[in-house]
Amino acid sequence: MKFRGKQIQIEPPKSPKRITGTRFASVLGLDVWNTDFKTWCAITKTYEEAFVDNKYTIAGKTIEPKIIDYLRNVYMLNLKTPEDVYGKDYFKKTWGNFFPNSKCFGGMWDSLLVNENGVEGVIEIKTSSRPQDWKHDVPENYAIQASLYAYLLGVDDVIMVATLLDDKDYINPENFIPSANNTIIRTFKVSERYKDFNKFIETAEEWWDNYVVTGISPEFDEIKDKEILDKLRTNIIENPKDLEDVLKELNQLTITVDNHKAQIKEDEKRIKELKDIVKNYAVENFGENDTKVELISDDFIWEVSKNIRETVDKKALEKDGLLDKYVKQSESYRITNKERND
């Protein structure tokens, strides 16, 4: 991996991940939560945070079957789930991709609206704690996601379902009961919402060819992509055998010292307060020509020294156009440690 300005270059991946519905929006620049650089890192397997279930994902998986039953029983919709189409363990059977014949697109739809002729529309189900996002319309990144699946299925109708959850629903999602009060249903036709959806497809395919096929990333943003850039700029090296004993002893001593520090933390705080009192007293008693003041006690000689150092006015140099000319870079290294949680 090489950094080239604001881009990264890697060996083009042999088996990249697909542009799923959730990634489609960020590729098009329509996802406020993700950048296309972060999506590129995931697709090319350059870097992606390991998936860990949380209260939001658990709630979504628990509530989705309830919504399917709700749509069937209350709205009398003829639906098919992934399990209906692919059988049990459908994720393992499909590797999470219901569109294996597509050049670069993939992903999994939540449910299908079907009739005697086949698939009639796609249904996308979302859980949300922000009803304001759904008050007037479907959030754009969700609409784009569902529209991609409709396009890949060759249908025009989309049914978006949003279940509005509060804290108790995230704590006990198994107790959630869908109703008109907590479930929003919005429908649209892809051809009406997006007059030329093919342009989105063409843009994503061009993005794929420019960045995934070449192995050269889109430009990153130092602020928006800071977290992932910090990971990419960290080199985790393997420990050589002759360093294992050193690291083991260092680990043990570090834990021992950290425990001692925790025990004497209050004493250290008080020592600092007392030292400040002594230092301030000494400073008040410096003579005009003194460079040092000593206070003698039973056990120690406490010495306070005056150090005079010259500083450079960087703002003035910058104003005069001289800062860049005289500033030199130097390298220094420091070692720190943090506790492992895995």
Image (cartoon, rainbow, N blue to C red):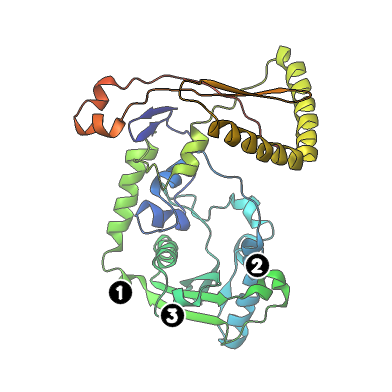
Q: Residue at x 65, y 58 (%)?
A: 54
Task: Identify the image quadrant of residue 238.
Answer: top right
Residue count near mark 2 (Cα–Cα under 10 Å), binned few <14, some 14–19, many ≥20: many
**Residue topped by disc 1:** 192
Looking at the picture, tell me which residue is in the foreground, 166 or 318: 318
**Residue topped by disc 3:** 135
Q: How far from the left and from the top, in percent, is residue 332?
A: 49, 20
Q: How far from the left and from the top, in percent, is residue 40?
A: 43, 43
Label 1: element kind: helix
Among numbered discs 3 and 2, the one appearing first in the sequence: 2
**Quick check: can you spot residue 137?**
yes
Dot 1 amino acid type: Glu
Q: How far from the left and from the top, in percent, is residue 181?
A: 57, 87
Quote the CA–CA distance across marks 3 and 2.
21 Å
Q: Residue at x 52, y 28 (%)?
A: 286
Identify the residue at the far top of this view.
Answer: 242
Image check: 235 left or right of 140? right
Q: Residue at x 32, y 72 (%)?
A: 193
Task: Identify the image quadrant of residue 10.
Answer: top left
Among numbered discs 2 and 1, the one appearing first in the sequence: 2
Q: Quadrant of the C terminus?
A: top right
Q: Residue at x 53, y 59 (%)?
A: 108
**Residue topped by disc 2:** 59
User: Contact, CB < 8 Å: mark 3 with mark 1?
Assistant: no
Among numbered discs 3 and 1, the one appearing first in the sequence: 3
Label 3: element kind: loop
User: Contact, CB < 8 Å: mark 2 with mark 1?
Assistant: no
Between circles 3 and 1, the one closer to the viewer is 3
Q: Quadrant of the N terminus?
A: top left
Looking at the picture, tell me which residue is in the foreground, 142 or 278: 278
Quote the CA–CA distance across marks 2 and 1.
32 Å
Residue count near mark 1 (Cα–Cα under 10 Å), binned few <14, some 14–19, many ≥20: few
